[in-house]
Image: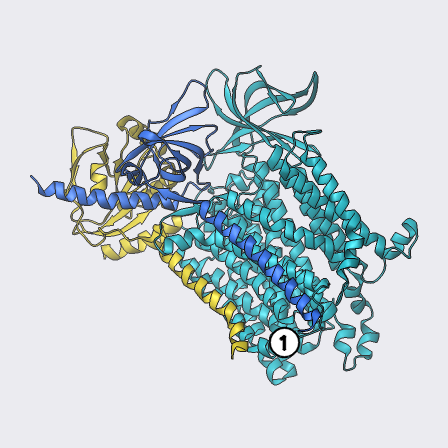
Chain colours: A blue, B yellow, C cyan
Amino acid sequence: MTPKRKKRLILIGMMVAGVGIAIAVALKAFNENLMFFYTPSAVAGGEAPAGHLIRVGGLVTKGSLKRQQDGLTVVFDITDFAETIKVQYTGILPDLFREGQGIVARGRLQEGNLFIAEEVLAKHDEKYMPPEVADALKTAHKNGAEGAATEGTKP
Amino acid sequence: MTRYLRYLVPLAIFALLVALLFRGLSLDPKIVPSPLVGKPIPTFTLTRLDNPAVTISDADFKGKVSLLNVWATWCVSCRREHETLVQLAKTGQVEIYGLNYKDNREDANRWLAQLGNPYVANAFDSDGRVGIDWGVYGAPETFIIDREGIIRHKHIGPLTIEILNEEILPLVAKLKS
Amino acid sequence: MIPELGHLALILALSLALVLAIFPMIGSLNNTPGWIALARPAAWGQFFFIAIAFGCLVSSFLNDDFSVVYVAQNGNTLLPPVYKVSAVWGAHEGSLLLWVFILSGWTVAVSLLARHLPAVVLARVLSVMGLVSIGFLSFLLFTSNPFARVFPVPLEGGDLNPLLQDPGLAIHPPMLYMGYVGMSVAFSFAIAALIGGRLDAAWARWSRPWTTVAWMFLTIGITLGSWWAYNELGWGGWWFWDPVENASFMPWLAATALIHSLAVTEKRGAFKRWTVLLALLAFSLSLLGTFLVRSGVLTSVHAFASDPARGLFILIFLCIVIGGSLSLYAARAPSVTSGGRFDGFSRETLLLGNNLLLVIVTAFVLLGTLAPLIYDALDWGKISVGFPWFNRMFVIFTPFLVVLMGMGPLTRWKHQDPADLARQLRVALLISLGGGILAALPLLHEGSVWAGLAVMLSLWIVCSLLLSLRQRLRYRKGLAGLWQDLGAKGSGSYYGMVVAHFGVAVFIIGVTFVMQYNVEKDIRLSPGESTELAGYTLRFDGVQARQGPNYRADRGTVHILKGEREIALLQPEKRVYTVQTKPMTESGIDVGFTRDIYVSLGEGLGNGDWSMRLYYKPFIRWIWFGGLLIAIGGLLAASDRRYRIAVRDRVPASAALGNDGLIANGGS
């Protein structure tokens, strides 16, 4: 192997190693930044980990929005019609936030299933609800319908 | 041989991507068919929205082609589709029934007084119990019911003129004939 | 009548696109001059008819013709005329029409400006563009006809989405599409070269200015989009790593790699296979972006009508175009000869490094964008990728890119002695290290390691650009010398590079400072009450109701004081658009070179009190200023005299057209 080729190989080796490390770091960060989505039923069923950054979504229950004394902190319920969880958020709600509207909140679950949101998202387009929410409602409904069916056969 | 294979790598990656995207298309939550399509409407009895003394039940749907529109005053999209429903009612092509879902009687009646009432009659489902039987997972939704009282179609999301012309009215015409 | 005319024009355009895609291509393969000659008139005819169709839709909007479904959904009599025009591309059907309109425009531009190309090559290029056009025209006609009628005719239209009623967003889509669609030119040149088996320096020189112009439009489009998001969404953010944004950013990254790689292929004849693959990739990512936006497979905060049937159509089209071109690549690439040789350390190697990094970053953005879909498809749960990850990824890769960016312009082609380069760059290294450390220390401001890093990287770019300028101008004297050099052949590319790289330096400062020193405050204020924000006093003077042309608004009044002196009066608004009954936040922004003050209204809390969101955004303008500089750099590079010389000297050059005539004559 000529010295020139050797130099070239070392250079390429260094480049590959550097880029490899960068990719590994980026991939590791990727895994840490994945946020899982949970439905209110999943939260109520204890599937969602407390203290981790997660997202929850559902419809804002009508009449549940309460504003606290400071005017900035709000508490509301979100539901998938099977279960309901309480969400607390301090800050300004998005323009399209309304009761009855599907929303997704990003934040952490506290003890007692209170969800402290860091961010609340409502779709720009009010025609559709966020797909995760639609899916959550659908799943909850399926289970609910089965429940209802068994109930119906009892009496 | 490997010399040639390596130029196939981009194509292979693309093929994987296409498979993923294809799967993604079928995952779309908006096109899931309702399990109730093709089945008779669930039995129910509810009070009428405008008059708590009068009831409305599944029997009212027999013998004619009709629509059942699930709506609520808290539902933003329902407001958007309301004008479309009023226009449809004016044409007299099909009877529209309403299922007022998880709502408040006064609010709902005020809404109809203000925005016009396209409905033949409204069933008042305050706790959403009947809604669950119908497989409602959000308002607005619209069902098409045939003469035998069988659900023929379900549309999720607000109705637009486009959807009426392409999806709803052709089916109504077919069921009527 | 007018809508029918538009519809008919579209059908005629589709048939001409078929002619364009079939005959010139076959003619070029079996050498039938008559068929080859069809390319140009077919391209012009296609443009003519699509222009008519586009004009028809514009006129339907201006005349409030609500018998057209699309107009009824997106137009309104109360809409200001400017927005009636921009409403044309406010939703799915119209934006597709704009897409094909721009595509046919690019096709005509190629047929006019690339006249000195060999007829066979030109015919193939136009033909491939015609093929792309067929896909989009039939998509338009079969799944999303913008001229469909409605009966009964509504009395009033559904109005344009209020979010889109903003000057920034009126021109953002056309710019972005100019970029997306412009990538089809580079793509078509690449396909034509692959078919002809001629991947050489001449090919690179032909496609280079086109690629650069498309890239410039993409840069402008993305910058405008970011500026719009900042102004209009009321969250003070300028980039959200939203799938729709990523869809425009991925082709930009690939195109950035492409313009660098094209430089190597043009100058040195190297990287040919790689360059051609990048050309395919850049356009494929544009198409993929269209798919992601239009099919609704990904959740996005952006509002677009999504429809799985349309998604399936685009997916099939993607398979044909991308799958076909990648198969052609797989068949032809092995026989392409390797070009100019280079040493382990040379400008070629550095550009290879640049390309590698840009492609890796593109792949990561793609991964982050598709990850929710991947997880969902494999039933691993529903996830989303937090935007901190995207930011972190860029923090990891940007320093590598910037180090190369500083070295590149000073490094020779073919071979460079590393020790020599190190000697030249010693000053730049010292200055940037020194500046970076100073910025990281808490002297003028609170210190931050990240701010230090940003200053270091920016200074590194600026210093090495200055060194490179000094080297270039070493035989020229003073400003006169600079002026003389500006007019020289090849100077456009050089100065374009300088300006664009300088833009990156400005951008890095903007991004890092706004993220490090951003001050954000959510607060409840009563009329007359004041609050402090980053050394400024903000006094709230209540909210008044106001009537706009098609909306009602609550307009707040906020005085900004520095000490005792009032420096600005902001009037943020909360609007409710009458037709769509949609609330909108119109923020009040005091614009400054080194900082913005940004106020947006939350909600009325009774007794005249309002919740409000206040931001102090240092250096945020630098982000868009940097983007603008990058785009200007692209413009300079594309206007390089060496691409125009051929046009001006066409007659003598074509007379001298010999064996090597393609190269001597090439480029427009």
| B138 to the left or right of C178 | left
Q: Is residue B85 above or below residue C637?
A: above
Tell me if I can see residue C499 in this picture. Answer: yes
Tell me the residue at 84%/57% (across/down): C472
Which chain is indicated by disc 1? Answer: C
Kindly state the secondary structure of the residue where label 1 is placed. Answer: loop
Give x and y (percent) for residue C352. 65, 63
Q: Which residue is nearer to you in this view: C475 or C652?
A: C475
| C230 to the left or right of A53 | right
Q: In which quarter of the view is residue C436 placed?
A: top right
Tell me the residue at 48%/62% (across/down): C139
| C128 to the left or right of B91 | right
Give x and y (percent) for residue C628. 69, 47
Q: In which quarter of the view is residue C117 placed?
A: bottom right
> Across the whole image, how many numbered discs are drawn on residues?
1
Q: Residues within 10 Å of mark 1 (few under 14, many from 20)?
A: some
Q: Is residue C612 above or below residue C427?
A: above
Identify the amino acid type marked 1: Leu
Tell me the residue at 52%/50% (across/down): A25
* Residue under label 1: C38
Tell me the residue at 53%/32% (across/down): C585
Give x and y (percent) for residue B67. 26, 46
Q: In which quarter of the view is residue C507 placed?
A: top right
Quadrant the C terminus of chain C occupies: bottom right
Seen as rendered, the residue at the extreme left is A155
Tell me if I can see residue C112 in this picture. Answer: no
Give x and y (percent) for residue A31. 45, 48
Q: Which residue is nearer to you in this view: C355 or A71?
A: C355
Q: Which residue is nearer to you in this view: C621 or B2?
A: B2
